[in-house]
Amino acid sequence: MSISRRTFSSALGGSVLAFGLTQGTAIAGSAPAQAGARARKAAAADDPYTQAFLTQYGKIKDAANGYFSPDGLPYHSVETLMVEAPDHGHQTTSEAVSFWMWLEAAYGRVTGDWAPFNAAWAVAEKTIIPQHADQSTSDSYNPSAPATYAPEHPLPSGYPSALDGTVPVGTDPLSSELASSYGTKDVYGMHWLMDLDNVYGYGNKPGTGGESGPGAGASFINTYQRGAQESVWETVPQPTTDLFKYGGPNGYLDLFVGDSSYAKQWKYTNAPDADARAVQAAYWAYRWASEQGKESQVAASVAKAAKMGDYLRYAMFDKYFKRIGGCTDPHSCSAASGRDSQHYLLSWYYAWGGAAAGSGGGWAWRIGDGASHQGYQNPLAAWALSNVPSLTPKSATARSDWSKSLTRQLEFLTWLQSSEGALAGGCTNSWEGSYSAPPAGTPTFYGMAYDWQPVYHDPASNNWFGFQAWGMERVAAYYYVTGNAAAEAVLSKWVAWASSETTIGADGSFRFPSTLNWTGKPDTWNASSPGKNSGLHVAVVDYANDVGVGAAYVKTLTYYAAKSGDEDAAALAKALLDAMATNTTDKGISVPETRRDYNRFDDEVYIPSGWSGTMPNGDPVRPGSTFLSIRSWYKDDPDWPKVQAYLDGGDAPVFTYHRFWAQAALALAFAIYAELLVEGGGGEPGGDTEPPTAPAGLTVSATTKDSVSLSWSASTDNVAVTGYDVYRNGVLAGNATGRTFTDTGLAAATEYTYAVAARDAGGNTSALSDAVLAKTKTGGSTGTGAVKVQYKNTDSSASDNQIRLGLQVVNTGSAPVDLSTVKVRYWFTADGGPSTFGTYCDYAALGSSTITHTVVAVSSPRTGADRYLEVGFTGGAGTLAAGASTGEIQLRLNKSDWSNFDESNDYSRATNTSYADSTKVGAYVAGALAWGVEP
């Protein structure tokens, strides 16, 4: 088993400007029209910002400009000589694919054409999301033993890292639930990196599971494997499916992992921020298409995003499923069960792998990650996955997981905000990647240690301003959609700091922070009384004019201004966007950048003594190899002479790059500014800015133990009312197109305050209705919910001393079911012996602690049954949504003297070894038989 992660180099930024330039904010141009204006149903193309979007979109989609590969995927950059996080411009990342999805969503809003958005998802499924052939042995995965521990090391010279099977590893609580929801053990997530022109020559072509070697076509690849200090210049690229055709006798595996023997295998790494952005893009597509009455046109793609969000929960777990908090020794830190290993943040990666098809062994592994970076969090995606029905994943616990994640992410960002306003790095559950003890006095967040540079150190991971802009853009979008007060508090302080460090000259020049320096540390997190972080500080080291980062910055300001009405933020967004737009090229918008870091082409790549192998093109890999020597094909690049001259002592080369993500971000900045800050969304005075009337007559029409139903009178509008936003305790709970709404998944015997606002075709929002108070019931009916039971036999012998079985409960009704009211009965005969039994739950997707189990004697024995195993659920199991499954519940029982059973005549026993509906296993809701036939 091997793992990887990726970095974003500070070189991603534009050219660095001298520190001594005048600081402060000089705004060029006039402030935009009313910050509260919204878009029409579909934007007009005659306002300059919508037109700028369409122009930029056209350049990106023009085949002559070279943004897309023959397989239809976006290149990381048009230019090929490019080294930063990817080490070649014609690679791609899941980052770029997620920006592509968002770009096409914006195009659908402007034009009403949703075919390109759907096409982006279709291409992703055929390429960057591994198909079954690419992960063909996933069925071998055992969630009780997800992976074998291998410590991380600070330096590449610490590798290969020896596997250590003596370190306890926890259980994976998601696998069975996901398999039940989707009928497969394949993982549905994007691998982070592909070689679109197969420059390396591994030929890991999507959909083949093979290693076909040099030739045309996209190929999966991987790079980072060796600790926090491994920069892109020190990596050894390797295939994701390693069939030992290249590298050494064991392929590339023994460069990274120490083992007694090696097996051919496949492995993939997910970048959670990219998958979360894909979800975010799907949310906007659904919202905009719904405003056009075209939500059915994007429904299939939105469902794919919901599925991706289901699997994205792996990023919420510790790497080896160990307990969260206080893990300071790999052996003494206990293996977790259930949700004890879940930190609820978006960590740096999750990864999965297994034996190559036909390699003679069936095994697979999965890992999460205990290190979380502020720049990866996405509260808008978390909110959408837990509040928008079309984006709510299928699995039983997904909605509650994302709801908890939303709260945890907002706490995390609050905890990391410096005195000045910028956000510090993050936290880790595994110090130095080896569950070591952090330095004394290190602050903690839910027991996880503060780390100012989580995950990678060359360069320091949180020194790049881009992670500030990327992260805060998502917070701002969430604030725009929901008005959340915690998000507003973080944003307002951040915007004030960033604005004070931004300069826009009268000549159209612009600059904002590039490299940051961190001192001090935050206070240990106290949710009930957060500290002020008076000892945590940031300083700007240098400034830059990177248009990609600038676009994210503009979007942050735009969302914030549109919701808060902050005229200074709106004016700065316009001035910065206008300044960047002056840097047009035939291919997009770009500024020259000097790449002084390209002197590292001659950096040595650590190769252990005695190791020898070859790259697919024949480049030797051995001690003394350099970045360039194992990539000798770079010398054939048309831009190589500029780099060679620099290596020979000349000036640092200057490039004008067109990175796909940056060009898409610029297009989106134009579109979002046009939608939210140009009056009426169309650029001409007189656009619709009149909001609907506030809804009247808000009434609580029904309550249950876990739901509240509301109704209200219709609002009126000068154009058309398109929907309603329902707020619970001041936070958006959901949306409705009609005049009713049912809020589910609530706590019993709890009071909630509700208010409703109307939205019109122009995106204007009414004032809130008068509030109403609702209280959920203590108990009683759970509505029209109905259930069925699925069973499988997990014990091949009918005459041993234990009965083993698997169960799962499925809600077949139209309303949630309170699982605490559900009982399941498995009927059997005791076959003599004692009347006392031992019962056990070995695994449950909901967590074993939420399952109750006991044996009950039947007063009058029946055919095939004088006992039944009764399985129930504690209140901690929550509710089961309509159409959802509890996921797998693994059970066993024995007699107290461990004598044998004769199960051959037991009423409920069957021989099927995969889940199937079983009418001989009964289900009872609130004491009444709801499924099955009793003996």
Image (spheres, grey):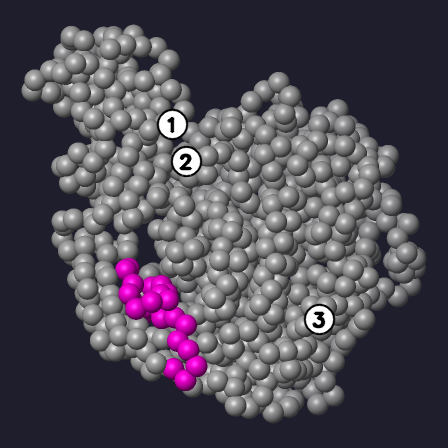
Q: Which quadrant of the figure contains the N terminus? A: top right
Q: Which residue is mark 1?
A: 915
Query: Pointers 2 and 1 in contact (CB under 8 A)?
Result: yes
Residue 592 percent across, percent down from the top left: 79, 70
Q: Secondary structure at mark 2?
A: helix
Query: Pointers 3 and 1 in contact (CB under 8 A)?
Result: no
Q: Is residue 394 left or right of residue 89?
A: left
Query: Pointers 2 and 3 in contact (CB under 8 A)?
Result: no
Q: Is residue 403 above or below residue 680?
A: above
Q: Is residue 846 magenta?
A: no
How far apart are the alpha carbons under marks 2 and 3? Answer: 44 Å
Is residue 591 something one can see in this rendering? yes
Q: Which quadrant of the figure contains the C terminus? A: top left
Specify the segment rendered in magenta. 717-743
**Nearest to N terminus: mark 2 or mark 3:** 3
| Residue drawn at (63%, 27%) of the image | 356
Residue 347 percent across, percent down from the top left: 50, 50
Residue 907 percent across, percent down from the top left: 23, 17
Q: Which residue is mark 2?
A: 180
Q: Is residue 221 above or below residue 726?
A: above
Density class for disc 3 (Cα within 10 Å; few <14, some 14-19, many ≥20) is many
Q: Is residue 875 above or below residue 831?
A: below
Q: Secondary structure at mark 3?
A: helix
| Residue drawn at (35%, 24%) of the image | 792
Main secondary-structure element of the magenta-colored stretch: strand
Q: Which residue is mark 3?
A: 56
